[in-house]
Image (cartoon, helix red, strand yellow):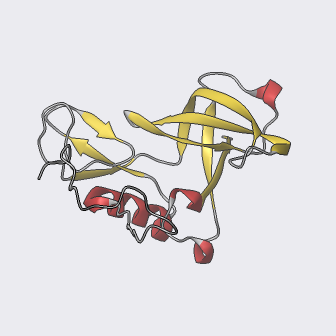
Amino acid sequence: MTLLERDPKSPLTWSGNLPVTSRYTFGLAGEKFFRAIKDEGKIIGSYCKKCDHTYVPASQFCEKCLAEVSDWVDVGTIGELHTFTVLYEGYDGARLVQPEIVAFISLGDGGLIHRLGEINLDEIYFGMPLEAVFLPEGQRQGSILDIRYFKPAG
């Protein structure tokens, strides 16, 4: 039976909780990327020699030539502000007491979307150098939130 065909014996509706569980995994490249953030407090990218392209976040395969990417490079903790937005509402739709600034920070040939901190809105400019601020070593769990925010570099 295909996804478009329907089993005539299946229920029309389901009441209550749906018994579905799932687990997201980072994959091999993501595991190495987040392990470097957690264990070493650094941001790494995967590098394709053939295309001369550094993927941040890391990728297992090159999107340009489809080759497996096996070289890793430390891209540093300082990137460049590419664009940003100001959030006035939280994820739950409630108004934030203090607006948050979220930006795309260029690192390598890619970059990360993350919060900005230690900065006022009127100080921001495109191309601004921004530095990652990590959680203390013992508090990191291996996620993008191990980077607390990016702040003006220098």
Residue 45 x %, y %: 35, 48
The relative height of residue 152 versus residue 6 in the rendered view (above or below) is: above
The residue drawn where x is 80% and y is 29% is 121
The residue drawn where x is 18% and y is 46% is 5
Could you say which is closer to the camera, residue 26 or residue 5?
5
Could you say which is closer to the camera, residue 22 or residue 143?
22
Residue 94 x %, y %: 80, 45
The quadrant of the image that shows the C terminus is: top right
Among the 4 quarters of the image, the one containing residue 99: top right
Give the mark count: 0
The residue drawn where x is 68% and y is 22% is 125
Among the 4 quarters of the image, the one containing residue 122: top right
- Is 125 situated left or right of 50 in this image? right
Residue 124 x %, y %: 73, 27
The relative height of residue 36 versus residue 62 in the rendered view (above or below) is: below
Residue 40 x %, y %: 47, 66
- Is 100 situated left or right of 79 in this image? right
- Is 116 situated left or right of 58 in this image? right
Residue placed farthest to the bottom in the image? 138
Could you say which is closer to the camera, residue 13 or residue 110?
13
